[in-house]
Amino acid sequence: MRWLPVVKTENGESSIQERSSEGSRIGEGLLTEGSCDELAASPGSEMIGGAPLDRRVYFEVFGCQMNKLDAELMLGVLNEDGYELTDDPRDAGVILYNTCAIREQAENRVFSKLGNLKGLKDARPDLVIGMLGCGAQNHQHDIFRRYPHVGIVCGPGEFLRLPQLIDQAREEGQVAALDLDKPVRFARTKNLGPRPHHAFVSVMRGCDMACTYCVVPTTRGGEVSRPVSEIIEEADALVASGVKEITLLGQTVNSYGKRLAPGRRIGLQHVLCGLNQLDGLERIHFITSHPRFMNRELVEAMGDLDRVCEYLPLPVQSGSDDVLRRMLRSYTMKHYRKVIDDCRQLVPGIALATDFIVGFCGETEAEFAETVKLLEEVRFNGAYIFKYSERPGTPAAEFADDVPEEVKRERNQVLLEIQRRISQELNSESIGQETEVLVEGVSKKDKTRWSGRNRKHQIVVFPIQGDENLVGQLVNVKVRDVTSVVLVGERPGEES
Ligand code: 5AD
Ligand code: SF4
């Protein structure tokens, strides 16, 4: 049986570049929306997959790639314990939400969904409802009080105990698991993601940085790197099972290796080098890098290793040194610009992406203008733009959140507009050229087209011919037309 975790990615973000290719988001289309009071009115629905009700799980994932990988690991342990996934909460004995705490909006959405589950729980007292992940860690003290129908609160450090936690919740009513210091098993035995040819592989967990706006160090704890050999072993097994593309994951992925081997400098470049030798692995990505840890060895490895793709997301957050200082980002604009120059020099044709936060505490017009200047100068291929959202318990929650919502919205729009224009211009440079596409599936927006990505992570769509199945294959596509988010083309020889 193939697991299809039901995933809802955050839409609180403004992005002119989708985080994942259209048509490839995990489980999209399986998501059941609507009030669970309504759902409670139609009990006794049919079983899916043959497992008894108490072994059927409805699962939703919110937030980042890390959360999706965690969801895969969770589903793996549940699967080993005889649980099966259902796409309908009415058919589930267990409802789990793997949650995100990074912005208030993401949390509020989960809270509203949790509230809606009360009717279902009243109608079916045996139902176990669990709030998992960063949101659970962040609100550990008030979830049971606000939502007494919730049975499990489990942080990102303990999710591998889920089968036991479900049993415990059934016996005791409520159980909390919030230890962040327990060793976490990283590896999974098989690729449980939705795309058989793509897998995420975790190289580290947690974050040692202390960006003042960010809740992650609290919800995920300090940084722990996995040994290189373990990562290569897992990747090797995934490639043997048909995976062609691997995305390495870490909160600050390029600080990988810290504390691994005292006296020796192990870095992400060693992992990349090992992976580059795996026969059958076509593409390697790594997310998300921190500007402070971008070193020459790593950039050189990107340039030298043929499987490592020419694509680097490098969140800058702001173009103003003063704002960066208040954010405790630990680099300056001078350093950031030098990193960008090195990347462009050593990795020809590299596509760069970034994240910005607008309206951070005290951000003046002049400071915002420096961000605009950076955006115009660097010409990123893609950017995610977020309005600052105060997170209780973070250092910045002590500062005044004094940029009015209206101004945050305007600044968000200004950056979006500029980025849209730049992305369109950069994408236009591909017109008339051939690009190698790893096909991910049928385009969601146009069922007559395949959709995939090229090595620069640009979405490429092209016509489906007959009953061919190209999913997971590498094909060349000649680009005919572009928008700010997608390249449209056809295979050479099939031009109309
Ligand atoms: N408010 C707004 N955006 C945030 N991010 C992290 N914390 C916050 C916050 N409190 C953004 C950063 C980060 C991305 C994953 O989320 O830009 O790079
Ligand atoms: Fe949060 Fe900063 Fe760590 Fe990124 S580097 S996860 S923004 S604390």
Image (cartoon, rainbow, N blue to C red):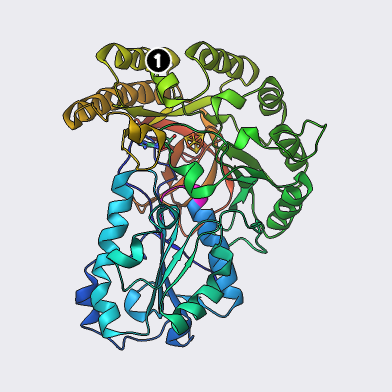
**Span colored in magenta:** 61-66
In this rendering, the answer to whether 305 lies above or below 145 is above
Q: Position of residue 237 (x, y in %)?
A: 73, 57
- Asked where in the image residue 183 lies, by quadrant, the reply is bottom right
User: Mark 1 highlights which residue?
Assistant: 322
Classify the position of the C terminus by image quarter: top left
In this picture, residue 357 sits left or right of residue 267:
left
User: Which one is in front, 159 or 192?
Assistant: 159
Q: Position of residue 325 (x, y in %)?
A: 44, 19
Classify the position of the N terminus by image quarter: bottom right
320 inside magenta stretch: no
Q: Mark 1: few, some, or many residues within 10 Å (few <14, many ≥20)? A: some
The total number of labels drawn is 1
In this picture, residue 471 sits left or right of residue 281:
left
In this rendering, the answer to whether 460 lies above or below 4 is above
Q: Is residue 445 visible?
A: no
